[in-house]
Image (spheres, rainbow, N blue to C red):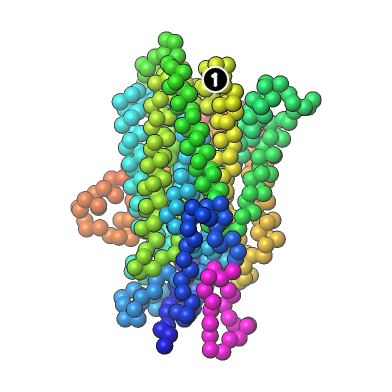
Amino acid sequence: MAESMIEVVEYGGATPQMTAATDSVSPVASAPPMENQYNSPSLSRKPLLSIQTNNPDKSSITPKTSRTPNFITPLGSPIRRAIKLTRFDPQDAWLPITESRNGNSFYAAFHTLCAGIGIQALVLPVAFTILGWTWGVICLTVAFLWQLYTFWLLTNLHESTENGVRYSRFLQLFSATFGERMGKIFALFPILYLSGGTCVALIVVGGSTSKLFYQIVCGGHSCVPKPLTTVEWYLVFASAAVILSQLPNLNSIAGVSLVGAVTAIGYCTMMWIVSVTEGRLDRVSYDRVKPNSDTEWFFGVLNALGIIAFAFRGHNVTLEIQATMPSSEKKSSRVPMWRGIQAAYLIVALCLFPLAIGGYWAYGNKIPENGGMLAAIYAFHGRDTSQSVLGLISLFVIINALSAFQIYGMPMFDDMESKYTSRMKKPCPWWLRVIFRVMFGYGCFFVAIAIPFLGSLAGLIGGIAVPVTFAYPCLMWIKIKKPEKHSLMWWLNWGLGIGGSLLSVLLIAAGVYVVIDTGIDVSFFKPH
C-alpha cells in the first residue's frame, strides 16, 4: 500500500499551492559528478516528479515541473504539521535557478570557486602598499575568515526548520526576515549591482583582455589591415557570453563553472609564479605610501580595506546555488553545500594569499594601481617572459570572465522570467527565454560602452554592496535563529553585523572622497 507524501515547493512570495504525490516515484539520484561535469544530468525541463490524481482533469492539473521532494517526514512529525500550515509557490519549478534539483557538493564547489575568484583579486598587492606587510596579512586573513563564516550562516539559513520553507534567493530570505519594504530599500540595489554590475564589468575585462590576447598572438602587429576597435572587442565578448547564456538553468552550467574555476586558478597561479621567479625589481621598496595629510592617509586606509573586501564575492548567489540541490529532513542540502564551499575556499585561499603576498614581494610600491598584477606583469616582464605564457594568462582571464558571466547573470534571468510566470501562470517559452537573455547580455554591453567611467564609481557603489557579504547574513541569523541574549553567537553576530554595516558606510564615504578629490573623466560612448 502506497503511503502518501507531501511535496514542498520553495518560498517565492506568489500564490501558494501544495501538491500531493505518491511514493511510487522514487527520488531521482544525482549522476556521478565527474562523469557529467560538462553536461548536467537535467538539461531538459521535464518533471522529476509526476503529479497524480484519482480523477485527472487536464484543465486543473498543476503543470508538470522539475521538482524533487524536499521534506518527506512521518505524518505525525512536527515538521509535517508545520508544513500543513505553510504556503508555497509552485512557480519556482519553472524558473532557471530552481527548476533543476540534482545538484551536489561538486557542482557547489565549481559554482562557488568560479564566482569567488575574479579579476578584482589581482589588485590585492595594491592594498599592501598602504597597509604594509603586517596589517596587510592580518586584514586579508580576517576578511577571509569573516566572509567564510557568513557563507556558513547563509547555508544554514537556506532551510527553515520551523516551517519547512527553502529560501532559494538572497532577496527572498532578506524580505522574509525584515519585510518586503526593507528588502527593497536595503537589499534590492546591492543584489542587482552584484549581478548586473558584475556582468558589465566582466564585459569590460573580457573585451579589453581579448584585444590584448589578439595583440600577443599577432606578435604586436596587426594580423589584418584593419584591427577591431575596443568597442568591437566588447561586442565579440558580449556575443560569446549571450550564446553561452542559452543553457537553461543553473545546474546545466556546472561544466562551464568547472572550466571557469580551472582557468581562474590557472591565471592566479601563473601570475604569482612568474612574478616570484623573475625576482624582485631593482630598488623595490616596502615602505608604506606616505600621504600629504592625515585625511589622505585615512581615506587611503579605507581604500585598501575596500580592495580586500571587494576581493571576496559570491554571497549573492550562495542561496541560489544551494537551491539546485535536493533536500529532505534526513539529508539536508546544507551538508553538501557547506562541503562544496569548504573545498572551494581552500583553493581560493591557496590562490589569493600567494597572489597578494608574492605580488607585493616582487613589486613592492611599484605595483600599478590600475590593473594590479596583470598590468605589472606586462609592464615589468613583458619582454623577458615567454609570449606563450602571457597569451595563456590572457586566454584564462577571458574564459573565466565568460564563465562567471553565466553565474552572475542567472539571478537576473531568473528575475525576468519570474515576472512572466507570475503573470501568465505558466512556464516561460523557449523563444521568450532566448529574448530575455539576449536583451540582458546586450544591455550590459550597451552600459559598458555608454558609461565607460563606471569603473571610477566602483568604490562608491561597491561600498553599498559590502553588507551582502559581511553584515546582512549576521543580522538575519539573529532575527531568525534568535540566539540566547549575551551568548557567544549573540555577541559575535551583532559585532560582525554592526562592523560590516559601519565598514559599508566608511567605504561609501571613501568613494565619495575619491570622486571629489580626483574627479571623473565623464565621456559617454568612448571606452578606453
**Residue 509 appears in the picture as rendered:** no
Determine if residue 215 is in view: yes
Residue 237 in the image: state x and y as whole percent.
66, 40
Which residues are drawn in magenta?
46-66
Relative height, residue 330 to residue 146 (above, below)? below
Residue 434: percent from the left, percent from the top? 68, 56
Between 298 and 273, the one lying in front of the other is 273
Q: Residue at (37%, 47%) from the top-left corner?
A: 342
Q: Main secondary structure of the magenta part?
A: loop
> How many numbered tags mark residues here?
1
* Magenta residue check for 226: no
Q: Residue at x 49, y 73 (%)?
A: 16
The kind of residue on which mark 1 rests is Thr
In the figure, residue 282 lies in which quadrant? Answer: top left
- Give the residue pinned by disc 1: 385
Is 368 drawn above or below residue 336 in the view shown? above
- Residue 513 percent across, percent down from the top left: 46, 29
Looking at this rendering, what residue extends furthest in the left direction?
486
Q: Residue furthest front?
A: 35
Q: Nearer the viewer, residue 515 or 92?
A: 92
- Count residues near mark 1 (Cα–Cα under 10 Å), then give few for <14, some for 14-19, many for 20+: some
Query: Which residue is located at x 39 percent, y 21 percent?
Result: 361
Q: Is residue 260 left or right of residue 284?
A: right
Q: Position of residue 164 (x, y in %)?
A: 38, 69
* The one of 157 and 389 positioned closer to us in this rendering: 389
Res 5 quadrant in image: bottom left
- The magenta stretch spans residue 60: yes
Residue that lies at the very extreme toward the top in this rendered image: 283
Dot 1 falls on a residue whose secondary structure is: loop
The residue drawn where x is 21% and y is 50% is 488
Residues 382 and 311: in front is 382
Image quarter in which the C terminus is found = top right
